[in-house]
Image: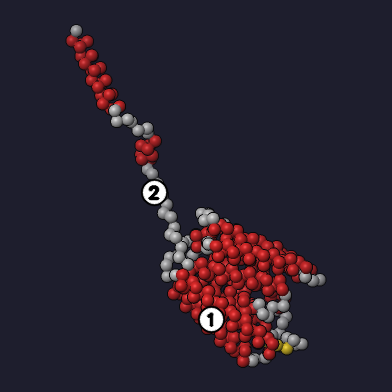
Amino acid sequence: MRKKAWLFLGCLIVFSAAGMLLRALELRTALDTSTMLMDSVPASWLLLALSTAGLVLMGVLARKGTETELPPSYNRCFCGLGMLIAGGVSLVLTVVGALLCLRARGSDWSMRIFLGVLSLLAFLGGAAWLALGLDGWRKKKEDSFLSAVLPVFFCGLFLIVFYKNYAQKPALLYTLYPFLGLCAALSALHLIAGFAVKRVRPRKALFLCGAGSYLCLVSLVGVQEISFRLFLAAIALELAAHGVCLLLPHPPEPEPEPEKKEGEEAAADKPEEAPGDAPAEAAEAAEAADGEGEEQAE
């Protein structure tokens, strides 16, 4: 299983690096900054082919990789030093991005409200990732459903704000990869949160973690706002870490202790008699019976 985890991470890094290079080349050669229109160039077709191949590979790894039964607990599945480090880095990225969002809210009151709430959810989502990493590191038995759900709320609102900010762009290729990346990330975080309520779907979660991480990394090139780039980087890092954990071996779930019956509990509560007490009591009873017999004879 460790080889499959390294294969997943290696393929994700290679495909993401190649996709970012092709995305930069596409935007440089095909994008008209005055009209925000994009022409179809060879880099666009190469990026589309690379993305298709990467998603197919993620699907194959998701189907062949999760052969063993995973523990249903979130803290037992997504644990280790890697998750703790990823949570700490994601918290730093989301906090810096939230501060930048608060500084650049603009004059539109609706967008200011959206960005203010997004900043709050970004901070809470980063703190939730760090808290989940700490719970897994400490091997806490109980899962925190609220910490697992907060990143879902953050990613969902981020998708809405991103759409409101980029929906007016006429170029479909300019916003295609960010929209697909955020949709895949939202679905992946939703399935990951299901582990906290014993709803385990490892194959779908692994595929969406790989797809969302790849598309979010490719989208870093075309996004203008630094805060949005930081949010995308944090989401991509967390999805990659969760995908690797899904392929790592996990200890089995501890078996529940058998329940004791009422008779066994009563017997266990009784004080144990010393081995010498029973013969002594028998001898005393025999002497008492002999004494009664003599009195009757007299």
Q: Which mark is residue 54?
A: 1
- Residue 11 or 155: which is nearer the viewer? 11
The mark closer to the camera, 1 or 2, is 1
Q: Residue at x 37, y 38 (%)?
A: 268
Q: Which mark is residue 146?
A: none
Q: Is residue 163 visible?
A: yes
- Identify residue type, mark 1: Gly
Relative side of 36 to 17, left or right: right
- Which quarter of the figure is the C terminus placed in? top left
Q: Residue at x 28, y 24 (%)?
A: 281
Which of the colour schemes (rainbow, by chain, secondary structure, one colour) is used? secondary structure
- Which quarter of the figure is the N terminus placed in? bottom left
- Residue 236 or 183: which is nearer the viewer? 236
Q: Which mark is residue 258?
A: 2
Asked if 292 appears above or below 247 in the picture, the reply is above
Dot 2: few (<14), some (14–19), or many (≥20) neighbours within 10 Å?
few
